[in-house]
Amino acid sequence: MHSIRRWCRIDKNGCVHCSGKSFERLRIIDDELARTWELSRQERDWFDEREGNRCRNCRMSKRVRMLLWSLKRLYPVFNPLHILHLNQINELSKVFSEARLLIETVYCPVGELGAEINGVSNQDMCHLTFGSNLFDLVLHSETLEHVLDYEQALSEAWRVLKPGGWQVYSIPLLHYRNTRQRIIKNHTGQTINLLPLSTHGLNGEYPVVWEFGGDFLRKRKGQIRQIHYDNYWKNSTVFTILEQKP
């Protein structure tokens, strides 16, 4: 059963990455995304803070600072670790540079799985090419909502973790809603939009398959050890999920 830390206040001593004291707030959620996810004004403001509250010095967003805050509580230093960093978060690459083993990934569906692409490994989260029990830490963020079989992706991360290792991740989620699926594939592999197409990314390149709600956390309660919130009562979208393999 998970425990909830509601008052982490990750920026109380400055940016968790660079100790910078100055932050800016950018508008990130556009009108189309707000409309397709049926966000209220308050919910839109929450996600804008999550993605658009950035350290003026290192440019790290609040979502990524939240991840880093949680990771530092698990591991004071990263150099002894074997880390699998799925769908590379650029701001964290330098943070992990001293790890004993660091594998960062991207997904190119037309490329060979396991092949190197611009210095990173081409990996499908649902069909990782690695053996079992290899990594101390598997990290991913804002990825599961784009994966048709997100439960398989989570299981694959568990498979490659060593016993006692941690899967740490974030997803866009609104607690009071139930999860809904926007895209399915039929028995022939054809993609079918159940709802109007919604995308993430600067160029709209990542279709949204899932909109996660509070039922996601209830379904994962057997795996989740902790959920870290920056300030649950002010903005419940800024959080990190931590799962530990027995």
Image (spheres, grey):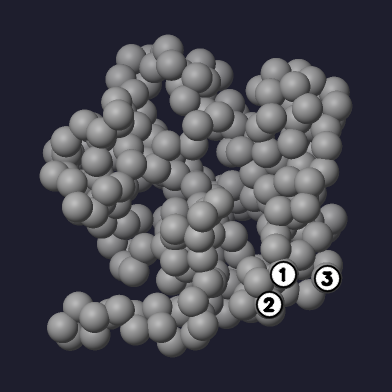
Foreground of the two, 196 or 48: 196
Q: Position of residue 169 (x, y in %)?
A: 49, 47
| Residue 21 in the image: above or below residue 31 | above
Secondary element at tag 2: helix
Whole-percent x and y of residue 245? 35, 45
Q: Which mark is residue 31?
A: 1
What's the CA distance linking mark 3 and mark 1? 11 Å
Q: Is residue 203 left or right of residue 87?
A: right
Query: Residue 41 shows which numbered tag?
Result: 3
Q: Residue at x 23, y 54 (%)?
A: 109
Give the total number of marks visible in the rendering. 3
Q: Nearer the viewer, mark 3 or mark 1?
A: 1
Asked whether residue 8 is in view, the answer is no
| N-terminal label among 3 and 1 | 1
The residue at 85%/27% (across/down) is 22
* Circles 2, 1 touching at the beta carbon (< 8 Å): yes
The C terminus sits in image quarter? top left
Q: Position of residue 55 (x, y in %)?
A: 75, 30
Residues under numbered marks 2 and 3 in contact, where contact means CB atoms less than 8 Å apart: no
- Residue occupied by mark 2: 35
Pick the front one: 73 or 85? 85
Spatial distance from mark 2 to mark 1, Cα to Cα?
A: 6 Å
- Residue occupying image coordinates x 58% and y 26%: 72
- Residue type at mark 3 is Arg
Q: In the rendered image, which quarter is residue 54 located in?
A: top right
Identify the amino acid type marked 1.
Asp
Few, some or many residues within 10 Å of mark 1 (<14, 14–19, 20+): few
Report which quarter residue 114 is drawn in: top left
Q: Callout 3 environment at 10 Å: few (<14), some (14 to 19), or many (20+)? A: few
Q: Badge 2, how many Cα within 10 Å: few under 14, some, many 20+?
A: few
